Amino acid sequence: MGTVDDGWGAPYDELTYIDAYEQLEMALLEPLDRVLDKANVEEFRPKFKNQQNPKNKYKKKMSADEEWKNVVYGFGTTEESELSDHESRKHYFQPPLQMQRNSFVKNVLMSFKRSSGMDITRLAVMGCGEMSLEKGICEYLGSFGTINVLSVDIDPVTLSVGQQLLEKYLNFHGDVLAAETGLPVLMRSYLGNILEPDHRFADVDAIVSLEVVEHIPLEDAKKFVNNVLGVLMPRIFIFSTPNHEYNAVFGMKPGEFRHDDHKFEMNRKEFSDWLEELSVRFPHYQIDKPHYIGMTNGYEDLSGASQAAVCRLQSDLNTTLPQNVTPYETVGHVACRLGSRLVAYNLVRDAFLEWLEKTEFRESELRKDGYTPYWSFNVAHILHHLHAPVSFTSTIDEKVASKYIQGMSSQKVFLDCSHGINGIGISLYQPKEDLIATVRKNAMKH
Ligand SMILES: C[S@@+](CC[C@H](N)C(=O)[O-])C[C@H]1O[C@@H](n2cnc3c(N)ncnc32)[C@H](O)[C@@H]1O
Ligand SMILES: [Mg+2]
């Protein structure tokens, strides 16, 4: 890999890409420690909490909250008001709070990558839940220089839902992701308790844990954070938790928690005191003052709905956790195939050039059914000249390859599907040398 002058993108060469793809395919063949029962995503949505505790679904919510919504937005009760998770009533925040938290993480990681000049090769998400963050940031993973994402959660049902939603997302956005710059990313999920450190999570550059600590008793939550900063020691750690004072905005009574499963909620002073304590205890981390996420007009004095900590490792310390400490079980893996379009394009280009050099254009094979005499060639034959593992070449579609060839030849080649195959046509009056020169010139840059 070359150096990046402005800290963005990554000028990987073809070989690096192909190697990465090959490694990815191998990793996807590794057996999982456990296969999770497939959870029913439809039933599970919209909130995991209701699913775990179906009674909550029918609990009537306070009217103060509904009144507030009426006042501010002029609409009445919706299904959302039946949710036990107050903040997820999306009308409070535009964009939704969850999305704002994800983009906060994206921005912090982007600037961390830029200022440190180092790739965030491995990124871990602890208490990943439905993998909202994973979905939200996958298109940026190339800019971070990420090739591995590790996600862990203790709840197999949530994890199964997360896996399914992530896979759906990756498939649906496959084309966009393929056009992004970056190496392919292996996204692996683990079943485990974040209170127990696992060496694979000690070996990462960044750890993110959004809205998780408050779901664990305070003492354990502190133990978890101490483990991250003292044992796992990532280069950057980001975690968030609700700002309890902000519950007033949702029309909640003082002391009432935002979510039934919360074991504690902190006000701004408690959270900032916690971060002070951490700074003293872990002097090798520089810990920012709390960041606030999710604002509502008229409530500026309450700062924001979520409070987040950003901790950056100051010295070149590494974990002392032994490699054989791996309590988490691997339960899934999926590929985010960033950059594959560029690789495919350049491979097709090399194949086309090689084919052009080796193929004789014989007079006897000229077709005369067109406006001018031309040769028609089967694209499949050109693709025999692809030099890459089958696992990759098999993902290159013939039709798409024909379009690439048409583009790289500056339209000096035309698409010819008139003979029942994916073909390209080359006119008798198109000099071969000129065609080769054009294709050489039209390399797509990483
Ligand atoms: C409110 S959800 C947040 C999910 C996700 N981070 C997000 O931002 O959407 C909290 C998650 O923490 C997980 N969790 C709670 N205690 C845990 C533990 N001890 N180990 C691992 N995960 C835990 C829960 O299963 C749940 O999925
Ligand atoms: Mg929560």
Image (spheres, rainbow, N blue to C red):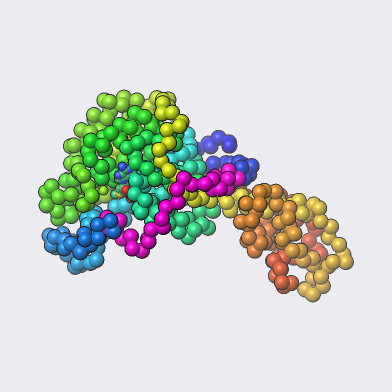
Work out which residue is located at the far right of the displayed protein and give it.
Answer: 364
Q: Residue at x 61, y 49 (%)?
A: 343
Q: Residue at x 88, y 66 (%)?
A: 364
Work out which residue is located at the far bottom of the displayed protein and give it.
Answer: 369
Q: In the rendering, at what x and y percent does residue 308 appear?
A: 28, 41
In the image, residue 12 above or below residue 397: above
**Magenta stretch?**
22-50
User: Which residue is at the front of the view, 356 or 216?
Assistant: 216
Q: Residue at x 83, y 60 (%)?
A: 361
Q: Is residue 42 magenta?
A: yes
Q: Classify the position of the N terminus by image quarter.
A: top right
- Judge whether residue 358 can be spotted in this image: yes
User: Which residue is at the front of the view, 11 or 385?
Assistant: 385
Q: Is residue 242 magenta?
A: no
Q: Residue at x 56, y 48 (%)?
A: 29
Left or right side of 410 for 84: left
Q: In the rendering, at what x and y percent does residue 342 appear?
A: 59, 51
Q: In the rendering, at what x and y percent does residue 117 appear?
A: 47, 34
